[in-house]
Image (cartoon, rainbow, N blue to C red):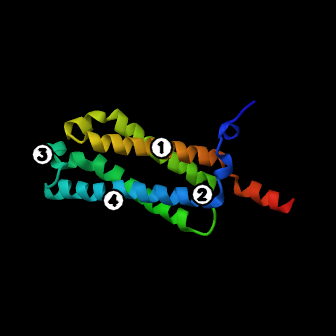
Amino acid sequence: MFSLPSLCPWGSLVTMTSRQRLMFANGIVLGLFAIPSFFMDIRAIFFGAGPLVTALRGEPSSGIGFLEAHGLAAIFALWFLYVGRTQAPPARAWHFTGAAVHTLLGASNIALWHFFIFMDMLALGYVSTAVHIAFAVLQFVVGMRATSHRAAADALRN
């Protein structure tokens, strides 16, 4: 029987350092999308200014989904930065969390693609969705290839 880790040709590249760098890069990229978007959401919802005002159509409360999604993405970005900068290697669960976050955000972009068309923001839609898909796949594969803390400790003892 085969498993995803055995099919991964670059499995030997999944080192503790590369795992930390992936988490840190994930935090930076996610933050570069989420944090400005979060503040644009605030600007549109509370001050009636900016490009998002068109999507709100005069009803600021309809922006709650934008505010929540971008706010939570910013929080995850900060956690990914923290995990990528700590001395300890990231737990496998962090890679699966990263994969889940990007899968949700990428799938949301695809499901609500008409928003990018309506807002005339197709370039942003293509770039952000591609980034979400890339990080979802990378994080999942690295999570599958990563050695758990328990297995690493057992290997050191033997």
Q: Tell me the amino acid under the disc marked 4.
A: Ile
**Going from the N terminus, do you reach mark 2 or mark 4 first?**
2
Q: Residue at label 2?
A: 18
> Alpha-carbon distance for marks 3 and 4?
24 Å
The residue mark sitting in front, 2 or 4, is 2
* Residue at 35% across, 39% down: 109
* Front one among 48 and 110: 110
The image shows a total of numbered marks equal to 4
Q: Residue at label 1?
A: 134
Marks 2 and 4 in Cβ contact (< 8 Å): no
Please state if 133 lies on the left or on the right of 47 as rendered.
right
Q: Residue at label 3?
A: 58
> Alpha-carbon distance for marks 2 and 3?
47 Å
- Please identify the quarter of the rendering in which residue 89 is found: bottom right
> Alpha-carbon distance for marks 2 and 1?
16 Å
Mark 4 nearby-residue class (10 Å; few <14, some 14–19, many ≥20):
some
The answer to whether 39 is drawn above or below residue 146 in the figure is below
* Residue at 33% across, 59% down: 35
